[in-house]
Image (cartoon, rainbow, N blue to C red):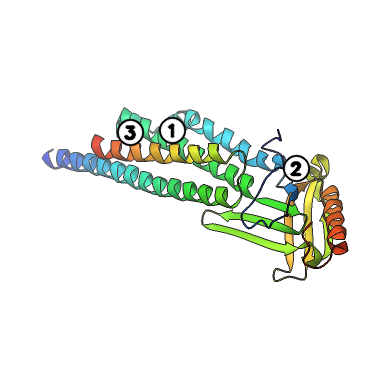
Amino acid sequence: MANPFSAFLMSPMMSFEGQEDGERVVLLLRAHLVTLVPALLLVIFLVFVPFLVPSILSLLVVDLAGVLTSGQTFLIGLFWYLLVFAYAFYKFIFWYFNIYLVTNERIVDFDFRGLLHKETSYANLSQIQDITPKTIGFFGTFFHYGDIFLQTAGTKPEFEFHHVPRPNEAVSKILEERRKEEAEAPGEVA
Amino acid sequence: MFFGENFLEFNFLNVGLLVKVFFLLFLLFYTIFSLIIFRQIQLMEKTLPLPLSPILTFSSILQIGVSLALLFAVLGAF
């Protein structure tokens, strides 16, 4: 069984909305897991903030118990952890659902850009004109992830795959699928 | 110090009211946020069924449940 957290998955057994007959997913990509580390560190820090607040307030000579009842203090603590959970959950689903698919026919970009912003873009493999993989920075080089820029002749001229693992390998796979697609007769799905 | 006592009482009531309004507004916005997240997950699951989608849907339902339970608890408690 494939790792559900995988950011680079060859030939995953999956389907998606709008999939054509005979179309199969050959590559699933999402941002490298390491891109979640800053959010994870922030969440760990936020979890410990309520333990630091009483000492900071005592330094500022603020008596919290004089202003709020114990029930209210408990509720404020609870709300804090609800917020921390909401932030962590949002970050995770944002990462999890931002997916780039390469099928034997096209590339599909599922963008989950914000709370109220969902976008899906498609481009046929035959429309791809230029592909540029880019690995920039210390973390990108160390953990081997980068961006892929695809120029297409379609309505959306540029596709960007951000922070995907093994960008060169992914580009090779896309080019291989494009070559196969170009060898097919027009309209053939194979 | 009659005026002083009344003033303190008024301040105490004000703080209590402010805290209640803050709690209610926070929970109201949190519930709306939870509902949007739940709906987004549902839509994404429909668009792209992924292995963790059922767990994420369940977590979002749990989040809605907790925020609603707290909303009613705060409404009833004060």
* Of the image marks 1 and 2, the number of the one nearer the N terminus: 2
**Mark 2 surroundings within 10 Å by alpha-carbon count, few (fewer than 14), some (14 through 19), many (20 or more):** some
Chain ID, mark 1: A
Of marks 2 and 3, the one in the foreground: 2
Residue A161 position, x and y percent, is 73, 55
* Of the image marks 2 and 3, the number of the one nearer the N terminus: 2
The local secondary structure at tag 3 comes to helix
Chain ID, mark 3: A
Q: Are marks 3 and 1 in contact (CB under 8 Å)?
A: no
| Rendered-image quadrant of the C terminus of chain B | top left
**Mark 1 surroundings within 10 Å by alpha-carbon count, few (fewer than 14), some (14 through 19), many (20 or more):** few
Above or below, comparing residue A133 to residue A64 in the picture: below
Towards the viewer: A142 or A122: A122
Q: Name which residue lies at 66% across and 62% down.
A: A121
**Mark 3 surroundings within 10 Å by alpha-carbon count, few (fewer than 14), some (14 through 19), many (20 or more):** some
Q: Mark 3 belongs to which amino acid?
A: Gln
Q: Name which residue lies at 46% across and 35% down.
A: A81
Q: Which residue is mark 1?
A: A57
Towards the viewer: A61 or A77: A77
- Residue A9, label in figure: 2
Residue A181 position, x and y percent, is 83, 61
The local secondary structure at tag 1 comes to helix
